[in-house]
């Protein structure tokens, strides 16, 4: 299948916020949209998005994974950017309607339909650097995506960076475009200089996350990850994996840890990145201050594999959804 994020379904749904209220959503053919060059988003980055998946089960019906939680996170992102906050029912309804319309286009598991709600400030005002956008556009596009690991599960190598921050503390838990712009330069430099796949940002020597995924350490009996605070994105895959780890008898340790501790822990713990696109991706090596470190023996670990499989089994319907994470449409 084509590269992740480059193929789109031919239908999408959008709703405008104007005159102080949300207008009725409309389902449309996917096409370029007209936006005024003075729109708030182009100048002052008033934008946020979500990313999650719908799966088609053998019964032909679609199931959306953790819809309510993604809607709530989008509301939080919108509020932090002082954008009009979409009502939960409005946004969830738009997503459900779109998925229902596209149900026949969803490829069967391990493929899925990736959903991308996006909210942008559209007020035409280049003098609004210190004012919120009073107009906004909310839309949801959909993209069929294949198995992330179809080329074989490869382990990732990360640069451990204690010099740069991924973004600001203020916007760390907001899913907003500017955060990726901030992480892009350091990530490209690290790829060019060290041949790594991603940067693990560790401001002041404290392990945080990469540009677009959370970071976890997993042993045979324990899973360790940073506790929630405003500095990083609260991944729903992270949360799902922690809950499944607890179900499977692992001790869940949400605690801060330093780079020094990380370099000790990788002798006994597997390392993984978590996010919607790949569920869990095994990390095989780290580069820190020019030195290479191997995570255990460098190969993908059994615990990472087991937890990833447990999550995917719920998503594709081969295990019971005991947490009520799926919305049937
Ligand atoms: C989206 C994102 C994640 C992962 O979130 P999920 O809900 O698990 O997909 C982690 N970190 C950043 C910076 C992100 O943008």
Image: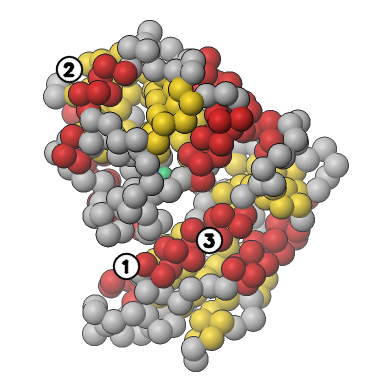
Which sits in the foreground, 312 or 266?
266
Vertical comparison of 136 with 191: above or below: below
- Does the residue tagged 2 have its C-beta within 8 Å of any atom of ligand 1? no
Q: Secondary structure at mark 1?
A: loop
In the image, what residue occupies the spot 56% across and 30% down?
A: 246
Q: Residues within 10 Å of mark 2 (few under 14, many from 20)?
A: few
Q: Which mark is residue 291?
A: 2
Mark 1 neighbour density, 10 Å: few (under 14) some (14–19) many (20 or more): some
Q: Is 319 on the left-hand or right-hand side of 23? A: right
Q: Is residue 301 left or right of residue 53?
A: left
Q: Is residue 43 visible?
A: yes
Residue denoted by label 1: 45
Q: Which mark is residue 72?
A: 3
Gap between marks 3 and 1, in whole Å?
Answer: 21 Å
Residue placed most toward the observer, 155 or 162:
162
Question: In this view of the protein, which residue sits in the foreground, 71 or 51?
Answer: 71
Spot occupied by residue 210 in the image (x, y as percentages of width and height): 33, 39
Disc 1 residue lies near ligand 1 with CB under 8 A: no
**At 46% from the left edge and 22% from the top edge, which residue is drawn?**
222
- When the figure is inspected, residue 62 is found, relative to residue 219, above or below; the finding is below
Rounded to the nearest angstrom, the CA distance separating label 2 from label 1 is 37 Å
* Rendering quarter of residue 264: top left
| Disc with the residue nearer the chain's start (2 vs 1) | 1
Q: Secondary structure at mark 3?
A: helix
Q: Position of residue 35 (x, y in %)?
A: 43, 77
Report whether residue 180 is seen. Answer: no
Of pointers 2 and 3, the one earlier in the residue sequence: 3
Front disc: 2 or 3: 3
């Amino acid at each position: 299948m084509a590269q992740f994020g480059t193929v789109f379904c031919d239908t999408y749904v959008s709703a405008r916020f104007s005159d102080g209220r949300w207008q009725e959503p409309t389902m449309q053919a996917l096409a370029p949209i007209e936006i005024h060059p003075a729109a708030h988003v182009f100048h002052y980055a008033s934008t946020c998005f979500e990313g999650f998946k719908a799966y088609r089960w053998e019964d032909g019906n679609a199931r959306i994974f953790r819809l309510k939680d993604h809607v709530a996170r989008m509301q939080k992102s919108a509020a932090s950017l002082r954008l009009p906050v979409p009502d939960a029912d409005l946004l969830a309804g738009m997503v459900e309607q779109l998925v229902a319309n596209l149900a026949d286009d969803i490829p069967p598991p391990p493929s899925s339909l990736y959903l991308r709600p996006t909210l942008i400030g559209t007020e035409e005002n280049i003098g609004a650097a210190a004012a919120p956008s009073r107009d906004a556009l909310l839309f949801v596009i959909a993209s069929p995506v294949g198995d992330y690991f179809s080329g074989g599960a490869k382990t990732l190598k990360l640069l451990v960076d204690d010099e740069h921050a991924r973004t600001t503390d203020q916007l760390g838990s907001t899913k907003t475009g500017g955060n990726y712009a901030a992480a892009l330069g350091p990530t490209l430099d690290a790829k060019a200089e060290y041949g790594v796949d991603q940067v693990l940002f560790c401001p002041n020597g404290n392990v945080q996350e990469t540009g677009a995924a959370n970071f976890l350490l997993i042993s045979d009996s324990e899973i360790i990850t940073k506790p929630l605070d405003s500095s990083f994105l609260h991944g729903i895959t992270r949360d799902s994996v922690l809950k499944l780890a607890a179900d499977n008898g692992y001790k869940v340790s949400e605690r801060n840890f330093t780079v020094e501790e990380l370099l000790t822990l990788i002798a006994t713990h597997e390392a993984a990145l978590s996010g919607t696109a790949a569920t869990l991706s095994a990390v095989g090596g780290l580069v820190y201050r020019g030195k290479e470190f191997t995570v255990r023996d460098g190969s993908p670990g059994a615990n990472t594999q087991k937890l990833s499989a447990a999550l995917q089994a719920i998503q594709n319907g081969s295990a019971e959804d005991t947490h009520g994470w799926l919305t049937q449409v």
